Amino acid sequence: MNAPSAKSRLLAALLCILCWTPFALRAEGLDGRFDVRSANLELKDGVYHLDARFDLPVSDAVRRGLADGVPLSLELDIDIERVRQWAPNARVAELTQRYHLQYNAVSARYILRNDNSGQQESIGTLDAALDVLSEVRGLPVLDKSLTQEGRRYAVSLRAKLDYGSVPFSLRVLMFWVSEWHRESDWYTWIFRP
């Protein structure tokens, strides 16, 4: 009887990993409600700034993972359109903002990084870090010169949350594991400059 080839042993090991991994990952995935709770624009120094609050799905498993150094990323998609009555709305601005939260074992602190600007904030506790991540304050999104007084504008905000450091190649193979990525519904409101 011939011994199994290296190729067939590798294929069998990969199949075992793929069959077992979804169950292990589900225990550490994101669960719970994930929504944009509130959002508004405020004019300051000729620029509209976004203030928003989110409900983050932070289970005990996610808390343990964060404390062990597993990263959490938040991405905001912001879309601003001028509302038109007899024609499709006209896009005025579109912005994607990314934040990254991870525990640093050397400093024993949580580091929250704004990926767009590179700014970092060092936070002492996980609860404080999650509180800061779940609230956006004073994010510049639109110059006043791009708006017209008396017009209506629809502002839409959607948040995406990624938890974990599963390599992209595994994410492609495990497309059915949705707990690693959550996306809120669009939160839309009308504002007048």
Image: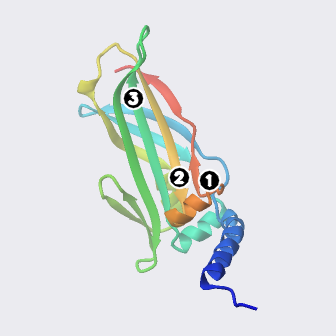
Dot 1: element: loop
Question: Which residue is farthest top?
Answer: 86
Q: Is residue 4 above or below residue 188?
A: below
Q: CA distance from mark 1 to mark 2?
A: 9 Å
Q: Which residue is mark 3?
A: 80
Question: At which x and y percent is residue 83?
Answer: 41, 17
Question: At which x and y percent is residue 190?
Answer: 46, 22
Which residue shows up at 64% across the image and 85% down it?
A: 5
Q: Which residue is mark 1?
A: 57
Which residue shows up at 52% across the image and 37% down it?
A: 38
Question: At which x and y percent is residue 122?
Answer: 39, 66
Which residue shows up at 34% across the image and 13% down it?
A: 150
Q: CA distance from mark 1 to mark 3?
A: 27 Å
**Residue type for callout 3:** Ile
Q: CA distance from mark 3 to mark 2?
A: 21 Å
Dot 3: element: strand
In screen coordinates, is 36 left or right of 60?
left
Q: How is the image coloured?
A: rainbow
Query: Of label 3 and label 2, which has the lower sequence position?
Result: 3
In screen coordinates, is 124 left or right of 127?
left
Query: Of label 1 and label 3, which has the lower sequence position?
Result: 1
Query: Of label 1 and label 2, which has the lower sequence position?
Result: 1
Which residue shows up at 58% across the image and 50% down it?
A: 182
